[in-house]
Image: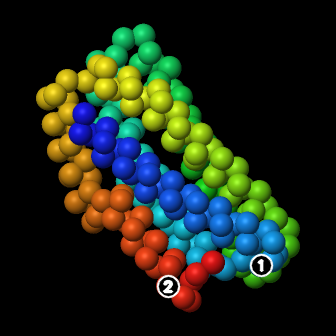
Amino acid sequence: MQALIVLAREHEAIARIVAELETRIDACATRATVDGEVLQRLLDFFENVVDGHHQEKEERVLLPCVTLRAEDEDGILAATLLADHGAERELLASMRRELEGAAYGEASCTAALVDLARRYIGHQREHSRWESTVVFPLAGRCLTRSDDLALLAEFRRLDLAFGSSVVHAACALEDWLGQPAHAA
């Protein structure tokens, strides 16, 4: 299934940015200071690219197709996927609320941001593992070749609507983070 390969590659790209977030958050915890611009860019990526673009593919394209084809597992799958994405959104919103105070050196905001980010990192990794070991194999078993082609067409449409692919957005952010002014 080519659509599942696309999503798996997106998971790999997202995992690299999660690792960047972890490195930056560990530095915040160690130094008790925050690089507001870097964390702003990382949060933008998670809010717009992961929550917006990638999860749009899962929630509005893949999940309805799998739900249509799968049997008993579909209700549990849909509820779990949506609940996990909702929990990620809540953590991102909470991190966003703490970022400004942390960037201005408020110790309580920095501590809260670090805690929330670590929770988000763990949640993101666990969720990605669950999708890779439960959702994708189920989709591989129940989707047809024509489903795969339809999913790929919708994925391309979303990439065009968002202006790039998830993988390209991750690479662009990695390039920006790798510049000397933004290096960890």
Residue at image point 36% right, 59% down: 167
- Mark 2 lies on residue: 179
Which amino acid type is shown beneath numbered disc 1? Thr
Q: Nearer the viewer, residue 36 or 32?
A: 32
- SS for callout 1: loop
- Considering every residue shown, the one lying at the far right of the view is 107
Is residue 11 visible from the viewing direction of this image?
yes
Residue at image point 46% right, 79% down: 176
Q: Nearer the viewer, mark 2 or mark 1?
A: 2
- Mark 1 lies on residue: 33
In the rendered image, the vertical position of residue 182 relative to residue 22, given as above or below: below
Residue 56 in the image: x percent, y percent? 37, 46
Instruction: Answer with mark 2 or mark 1, whichever residue precedes in sequence.
Output: 1
Q: Nearer the viewer, residue 50 or 104?
A: 50
Q: Residues within 10 Å of mark 1 (few under 14, many from 20)?
A: some
Residue 111 in the image: x percent, y percent? 82, 65
In the rendered image, the vertical position of residue 166 relative to residue 81, given as above or below: below
Mark 2–mark 1 distance (CA, rounded to whole Å): 20 Å
Residue at image point 22% right, 60% down: 160
Residue 164 in the image: x percent, y percent? 28, 64
Apparent side of residue 135 relative to residue 165 in the rendered image (left or right):
right
Residue at image point 71% right, 55% down: 118
Is residue 52 visible from the viewing direction of this image?
no
* Quarter of the figure with the C terminus: bottom right
Apparent side of residue 163 relative to residue 115 in the rendered image (left or right):
left
Which amino acid type is shown beneath numbered disc 2? Gln
Q: Do the numbered discs 2 and 1 sit on residues whose CB atoms are within 8 Å?
A: no
Residue 84 in the image: x percent, y percent? 56, 37
Q: Residues within 10 Å of mark 2 (few under 14, many from 20)?
A: few
